[in-house]
């Protein structure tokens, strides 16, 4: 008996028992549709994450932090993340671009809106990386010195600008209030119109010479007053630096992992005017300058500036692990998106397995249907099996015939199940997209049905069906022809 | 008659016992039989005398408790299951009292089924089956299912199925048992003509008259043993 004969006989038997075959196939269809749609959801989610990682170039991005966390006490010998460190990173083979995360608070007037937000100055080379590639409208600024700015979609919401296109060409008056030691010192000399010598006049000079307690008291009072005036001058007599820029582009504000896109991105040289003219109003900057002995040495000197984070763009052709090791060996902490992605992929494998297991449970139930169908078929066809054996069929041929029948049920059910699963995912996608559009969420493909999943579903469906048919097939093969052909 | 010198099929001390509850039933006990090539043997006896058991053992459908069946000198006992299946597929044909046609097959498909297992090329099967049915006067009935055929026609289809593969021995188990007189006569004539054409036939029957008319030798069985043998020629 040839394979074609076995196929023809099996197909004929299934056609003959239409209702029973249909019901058994329906069980497989439901199970495989559940399996396919569930694993398809897991695969779709994985592909979405992968796509976002790739679109943002995260797989070739590495974040570097100082070993010492900001909330930990300072320890001696811990390397700082400063300009010199960034220069060292840039020399590591495979590192293409290095830039610090150095945001600052700005006041922005845009039309009638006055907004306080955060800005970051970036070199043109940094903006050409994938991290900043999600331009919604316009272009990035043409040079590091141009008087233009790129704003994020979050900024548009704050400023009440309805569409990205309508933001282009608008003027931004950007101002930064910086504290300088000059303003603090001038406040020591003159406070609220009262010069310091007015106070000196009130001091009894003769008592200073004869009364030691009076001398000490006067020194303490005046020292306190001088410090009060210095601090007051530092925090309240700040200098305002203003610049007028034009919005040239709008960037997507979507946050991805640890990548931060501030609401206003400025050209490097333009932004440096704001960051090198003084210190921020943050008290820690003041104390840092005092403790490092640079309070009167001109704050904002780049050599003295420490960063909390730096971003490295890596050559995607070079493995990231040695670069990570090299930086960590220098005493810094790193965060690699590529490493994170490897962990995410593992998590997705577990997710797919969990989702697949639910579908396989349904398949297990359906397989009982196959056992039942084939066992019924065996009972009904005992005589036919006896006839075949009397005509020369051996046990193997009878077994194969039954296995092929159950395999056909599995294959037809699996094929229809994959199709049904695909239809289900399409329907859910359409509904989800309507919801996403209504909620203003960017549309994403929730499901993915790759070829390997189709092949896997067909293989599992057919395999389980063959397995389920193996017991009835073995019993069919063992049918005693004498008993089967007995006249009664 | 076209008999050869040596026996074509032989049984040696053939026994078939089986248990029915606590009791041992001796369906066949020490049967020795020799059948020459081209012979027509009639086996007669009452119900339960072991006629069908003997036939099943000779056809390789059943396994003896002891003793052996030798076909052309080869003991069936020495054959593997696969070889035994090949023996049934190529060397023998079988006819049953209840026809044993596959009910959802047409007459043509039933006859073709016999060629599934003997390596006949797929393209030739239909021609051979159709030719055989035509020779037996069933050209107009090829597409009919067994339920649409008379008893005689069904048995002729069964004969066609048995002989289409050109077997060396035909085993007929009560071939006329379910037929009326006219149809029984037709089947008997058919078997005689097949034997005249050289086919060795072993026929089990209740009908002594028919056995006398068709067979060269009649073997009478009783209680699982050969009770006697008579020649008819």
Image (tube, rainbow, N blue to C red):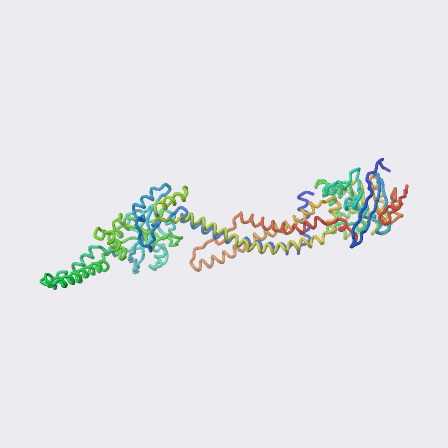
Outermost residue to the top: B5
Q: Is residue A222 above or below residue A268?
A: below
The residue closer to the viewer here, A79 or A114, is A79
- In the rendered structure, the answer to whether residue A317 lies left or right of residue B8 reads left
Query: Residue A393: which quarter of the image?
Result: top right
- In the rendered structure, the answer to whether residue A486 lies left or right of residue A236 reads right
The residue closer to the viewer here, A28 or A161, is A28
- In the rendered structure, the answer to whether residue A277 lies left or right of residue A216 reads right
Outermost residue to the left: A206
Q: So how many labels did they put on this image?
A: 0
Residue A350 placement (x, y as % from top left): 50, 52
Residue A277 placement (x, y as % from top left): 24, 52
Q: Which residue corresponds to the image point at 51% horizontal and 52% vertical from the top-left?
A: A352
- In the rendered structure, the answer to whether residue B151 lies left or right of residue A411 reads right
Q: Is residue B175 visible?
A: no
Instruction: Identify the image quadrant of the C terminus of chain B.
Output: top right
Q: Is residue A188 above or below residue A324?
A: below
Residue A401 placement (x, y as % from top left): 68, 47
Query: Residue B125: which quarter of the image?
Result: top right
Instruction: Identify the image quadrant of the N terminus of chain B.
Output: top right
The residue closer to the viewer here, B105 or A472, is A472
Q: Is residue A375 visible?
A: yes
Residue A252 placement (x, y as % from top left): 38, 53
């Amino acid at each position: 008996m040839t394979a074609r004969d076995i196929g023809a006989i099996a197909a004929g038997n299934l056609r003959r028992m239409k209702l029973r075959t249909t019901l058994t196939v329906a069980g497989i269809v439901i199970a495989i549709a559940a399996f396919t749609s569930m694993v398809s959801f897991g695969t779709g989610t994985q592909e979405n994450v992968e796509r976002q990682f790739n679109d943002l170039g995260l797989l070739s991005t590495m974040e570097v932090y100082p070993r010492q966390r900001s909330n930990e006490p300072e320890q001696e010998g811990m390397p700082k993340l400063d300009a010199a460190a960034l220069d060292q990173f840039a020399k590591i083979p495979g590192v293409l671009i290095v830039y610090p995360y150095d945001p600052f608070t700005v006041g922005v007037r845009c039309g009638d809106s006055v907004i306080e937000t955060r800005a970051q100055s970036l070199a043109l080379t940094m903006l050409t990386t994938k991290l900043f590639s999600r331009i919604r409208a316009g272009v990035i600024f043409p040079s590091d010195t141009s008087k233009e700015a790129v704003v994020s979609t979050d900024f548009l919401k704050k400023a009440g600008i309805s569409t990205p296109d309508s933001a282009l060409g608008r003027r931004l008056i950007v101002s930064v209030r910086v504290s300088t030691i000059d303003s603090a010192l001038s406040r020591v000399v003159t406070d609220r119109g009262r010069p310091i010598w007015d106070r000196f006049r009130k001091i009894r000079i003769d008592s200073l010479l004869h009364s030691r307690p009076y001398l000490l008291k006067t020194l303490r009072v005046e020292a306190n007053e001088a410090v009060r005036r210095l601090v007051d001058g530092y925090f309240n007599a700040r200098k305002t630096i203003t610049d007028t820029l034009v919005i040239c582009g709008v960037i997507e504000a979507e946050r991805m992992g640890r990548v931060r896109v501030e609401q206003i991105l400025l050209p490097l040289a333009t932004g440096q005017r704001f960051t090198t003219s003084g210190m921020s109003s943050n008290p820690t900057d003041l104390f840092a300058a005092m403790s490092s002995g640079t309070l009167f040495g001109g704050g904002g000197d780049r050599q003295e500036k420490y960063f909390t984070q730096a971003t490295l763009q890596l050559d995607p052709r070079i493995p990231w692990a040695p670069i990570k090791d090299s930086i960590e060996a220098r005493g810094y902490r790193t965060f690699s998106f590529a490493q994170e992605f490897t962990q995410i992929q593992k998590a997705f494998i577990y997710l797919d397995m969990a989702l697949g297991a639910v579908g396989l449970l349904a398949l297990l139930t359906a397989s009982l249907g196959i056992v039942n169908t084939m066992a019924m078929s065996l009972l009904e066809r005992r005589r036919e099996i006896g006839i075949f054996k009397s005509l020369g069929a051996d046990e193997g041929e009878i077994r194969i015939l039954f296995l092929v029948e159950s395999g056909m049920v599995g294959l037809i059910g699996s094929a229809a199940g994959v199709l049904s699963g695909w239809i289900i995912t399409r329907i859910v996608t359409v509904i989800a997209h309507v919801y996403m559009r209504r909620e203003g969420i960017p549309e994403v493909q929730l499901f993915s049905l790759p070829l390997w999943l189709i092949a896997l579903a067909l293989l599992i469906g057919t395999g389980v069906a063959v397995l389920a048919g193996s017991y009835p097939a073995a019993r069919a093969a063992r049918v005693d022809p004498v008993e089967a052909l007995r006249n009664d | 008659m076209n008999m050869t010198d040596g026996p074509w099929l032989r049984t040696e001390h053939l026994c078939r016992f089986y248990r029915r509850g606590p009791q041992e039933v001796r369906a066949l006990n020490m049967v020795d039989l020799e059948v020459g090539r081209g012979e027509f043997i009639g086996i007669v006896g009452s119900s339960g005398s072991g006629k069908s058991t003997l036939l099943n053992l000779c056809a390789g459908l059943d396994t003896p408790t002891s003793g052996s069946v030798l076909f052309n000198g080869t003991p069936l006992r020495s054959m593997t299951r696969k070889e035994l299946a090949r023996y049934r597929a190529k060397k023998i044909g079988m006819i049953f009292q209840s026809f044993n046609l596959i009910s959802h097959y047409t007459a043509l498909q039933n006859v073709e089924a016999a060629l599934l297992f003997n390596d006949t090329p797929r393209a030739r099967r239909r021609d051979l089956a159709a030719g055989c049915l035509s020779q037996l006067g069933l050209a107009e009935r090829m597409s009919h299912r067994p339920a649409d055929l008379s008893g005689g026609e069904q048995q002729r289809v069964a004969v066609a199925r048995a002989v289409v593969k050109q077997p060396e021995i035909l085993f007929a188990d009560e071939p006329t048992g379910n037929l009326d007189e006219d149809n029984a006569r037709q089947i008997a004539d058919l078997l005689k003509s097949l034997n005249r054409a050289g086919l060795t036939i072993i026929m089990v029957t209740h009908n002594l008259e028919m056995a006398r008319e068709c067979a060269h030798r009649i073997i009478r069985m009783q209680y699982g043993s050969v009770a006697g043998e008579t020649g008819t020629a």
